[in-house]
Image (cartoon, helix red, strand yellow):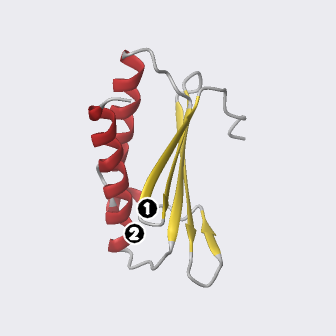
Amino acid sequence: MIIEDILLIDKVHASIIEGLDVQSIEYEDYEFIYLIYEDLGIRREQLILHLSNGKSITDRGIGEDHSPDLDYYLRSLFIQMTERGDKWKSMTLKFVGGKVITNFSYEDNPPPW
């Protein structure tokens, strides 16, 4: 990964935080999963929030109304990395203990249906 990738990942994280702040959701940490199905032209997002009471909220979308730049940053990151030959198919971004941890997978994603 290069500095431009890290800057875009920081923007993805900031967009997620912004969307959660707008909705006034209190959480301990989160896991954001971004799946790409290039053959189908589909991109899927999933957000899992871990609450202070030990419970989790899954599939709570942050939506374009709350974070309009998120899709732009995600697509930019994918294009930027793909142009260098780093063509991933899914990304997991975890925010735990005040740190952002990313993991990229190069394997095909299970069908979205």
Q: Nearer the viewer, residue 75 or 64?
A: 75
State how far apart marks 2 and 1 are (Cα): 7 Å
Query: Where does the image place residue 85, in percent across and percent down from the top left?
Result: 44, 14
Please say if 13 is above or below 113: below
Position of residue 70 measured from the top left corner of the image (x, y, whole percent): 35, 49
Instruction: Check residue 51 in the rendering and tell me which mark sits there, or answer none.
Output: none
Q: Amino acid at mark 2?
A: Leu
Q: Residues within 10 Å of mark 1 (few under 14, many from 20)?
A: many
Q: Is residue 72 visible?
A: no
Provide residue 57's location: percent of width, then percent of height.
Answer: 60, 70
- The foreground one among 63 and 95 is 95
Q: Residue at x 29, y 49 (%)?
A: 69
**Of labels 2 and 1, the one closer to you:** 2
* Quarter of the figure that contains the C terminus: top right
In the picture of the structure, the residue carrying the numbered disc 1 is 62
- Is 53 drawn above or below residue 95 in the view shown? below
Tag 2–tag 1 contact (CB < 8 Å) = yes
Q: Is residue 19 above or below residue 44?
A: below
Q: Quadrant of the N terminus?
A: top left
Mark number displayed over residue 20: 2
Image side of residue 32 versus residue 15, left or right: right
Q: Quadrant of residue 44?
A: top right
Report the residue at 39% width, 24% height from top.
81
48, above or below 108, in the image: below
